[in-house]
Amino acid sequence: MKSLRFALLPLLLLQTLAAPAFELPAGSSQCLVGTAEDWNSSHVTLRLYQRQGGKWSPKGEPWTGRLGKSGLCWGKGIHPVPAGVTTKKEGDNRSPAGVFNLGGAWGYAAAIRKHPTLPYRKVTSRDLWVEDPASPNYNRNLVLDHEPNTPWEKKQQMQQTDPVHALKLFIAHNAQPDVTPHAGSSIFFHIWRAGGSRATAGCTTMSQAKLEWLISEIDPTRKPLYVLLPKAEYLGYKAKWKLP
């Protein structure tokens, strides 16, 4: 048994060395970067970048936003999650950190300014966003064929009268089809509350004008990403992950 164990070591080492290191997908040429002071900060600085000819260039000036009131922790996106770290849980009031795809937009208006290929849905009374970890529809938009009439349906109902939810863009943390129960749901960019004086339950918020601009710039054909990290981690992963 001892000789077999030692015989396997070179093979395991070779497999480890051969494992591809993570970096932003080559096909993604649009990236929103958010950096916080540290893991416990609820404030974020945001900037949009686009890649051309292998080089990332900023588009527009940086702006400020708000994060979860308890700060950040590692989320479930396309990035590798370090071993032994705290990860996002339902109700922890932390924003998920890492690298995430972006989904469609939702809002109260009949139409919004956006790229032609970005999905947009006007929220109705029949729109749910399921935050129940026990549901097979956890962390997705579910449209009922009837008005909500059970306590469960009413609890999952998307907001229709709260101004901060009048426009939102989905951040694909723990997203379908690979969803982990209790790992966090309903993570969006949306309008900040009280002019940015209040933190969130885990979303990334900003002024209405900046959110409208951001959504108008998001181009699904560029396979856009959201990178959210504390400053120290961003600098540590920047070269390795080929971040902007």
Image (spheres, rainbow, N blue to C red):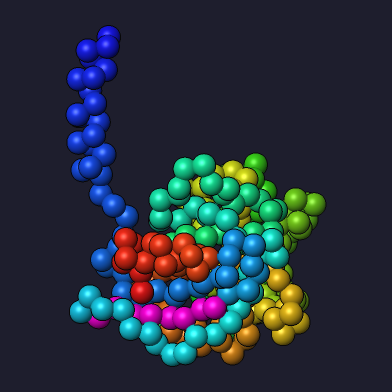
Residue 128 visible in the snapshot: no
Q: Is residue 46 magenta?
A: yes
Q: Which residues are magenta?
A: 45-52
Q: Residue furthest top?
A: 1
| Residue 129 picture location, percent across and down | 63, 60
Residue name at image x 43 percent, y 81 percent: 48
Which quadrant: the N terminus? top left
Residue name at image x 39 percent, y 62 percent: 237
| Residue 76 picture location, percent across and down | 49, 52
Please state which of residues 90 and 215 is positioned toward the viewer in this rendering: 90
In the picture, measured across the screen, residue 12 lies left or right of residue 165, that is: left
In the picture, measured across the screen, residue 171 lies left or right of residue 115, that is: right
Residue name at image x 62 percent, y 86 percent: 208
- Can you tell which quarter of the image residue 72 is in? bottom right
- Can you tell which quarter of the image residue 55 is in? bottom left
| Residue 24 picture location, percent across and down | 33, 63
Residue name at image x 44 percent, y 90 percent: 60
Q: Is residue 88 magenta?
A: no
Position of 235 relative to 191 (above/below) = above
